[in-house]
Amino acid sequence: MTVRDPWKPCPVPRFEPFTAIRYATDDLAAVVAPPYDVLSGADVDALEARSAHNIVRIDVPRGGEDRYDVAAKTMHAWLDEGILVVDPEPSFTVYRMRFTDSAGTRRDIAGVLGALGVVDLEAGGVLPHERTTPEASTDRLELTRATVSNLSPVWGLSLAAGLTELLAEPGEAVGTVTDEGVVHVVERVTDPRRIAAIRDRLAADDVLIADGHHRYSVSRSYRDEIREATGRTDTPAELTLAFVNELVEEQLSVEAIHRLYSDIEVPELAAALARSFELIPTDRPSSDTLAAMATEEFLVLVSRDGCWRLQPKPGRFDGVRALDGGWLETTLADVPLTVTYQHGLDETLAEVTIGSASAAVLIRPVSVAEIERTAREGLLMPPKSTFFTPKLKTGFVIRSLSD
């Protein structure tokens, strides 16, 4: 992708308060859930057992072809019964996550839930940060049509300086949930002056999509359907639910998404990698290996029968952006194989051990500085370059798409 034309006007991101739908209960831990795309069937079972009103009963509907209608009926019933309530006025929701990352660093993310403008690809204002892999499923679009709601937020990063400072003052307390060492805090903001300050600050620079590219794409498809059906461009479908925080290194925890290769034999894969890397036999990787990869600048090839340190050959990647995913794409561009993606060292090694993949290549996390640099230059990273942690909870707020 080419660098953005500096002479072409770029629209500002639109970010608006909305009238939120929230749970009436004080026990938010029982009803919120991780995002749908990280949940296994067993996870959904456990969440359903936690509460008859857990958000997964709407956000991860089960059953046959009528499951989306069932989800919509469930949501309407909860509204009628007072399980879910509609705020009396539009608001922003400050959302804080406090945790210790995998490297032992204490982090405090401060962001805001609001309605982010839905724009066309390359229109500007709201930018993808990596190429996306094709999504064949229409699950999210069907669910949006049925519930006429945004259930799960996109995660955006604001390139405008100063948002964190605007969010420092606490809002009206809504609730706190502690899960797996992460403290999630939500606060409501209704003061018009503070709402205007947040909205104006976010309009000062681009918003970069960190997580939820597919959700944002679904919002674009839904917006287009509503435009075609109504002939209007002023409906709630012109925006989508999003969490936005400032792109600052001390807040963000970015982990790697490793590569799994199949439909290729290990010797053939190793030979292809040897064109760009020195392959040095090494021990089975551990958490110490991941730390050494960052400081000593190498990758690791893992198979069931052996492991090799991948040391880039001098000059091989001159002119190629210093991204491990990009190096592997460049090296294996002409090699017939299938690549999939896995976060977490143990999970990646398990895929190789059980034979789900012929081999894996462990890569390093992308730095926050590189994320910003790529965005500023209008470029896209390879698919699955970044894994932002921790994951946002679904269920703190729901955004209606009805007029």
Image (cartoon, grey):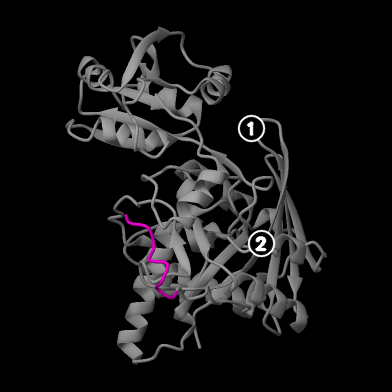
Helix, strand or loop at disc 1? Answer: loop
Residue 219 placed where, x, y %? 41, 70
Q: Which residues, given as a range, are shown in magenta?
A: 1-9
Viewer-nearest residue: 399 or 132? 132
Label drawn at residue 161 = 2
Left or right, 181 with respect to 237, comes to: right
Amino acid type at image mark 2: Ala
Write down the residue under mark 1: 102
Residue 27 placed where, x, y %? 74, 58
How many C-alpha atoms fall within 10 Å of the one at disc 1: few (<14), some, or many (≥20)? Answer: few
Viewer-nearest residue: 180 or 64? 180
Left or right, 347 with respect to 330, comes to: right
Residue 211 is at least partly visible in this image: no
Amino acid type at image mark 1: Ser
Residue 207 placed where, x, y %? 53, 64
| Image quarter hosting the N terminus | bottom left
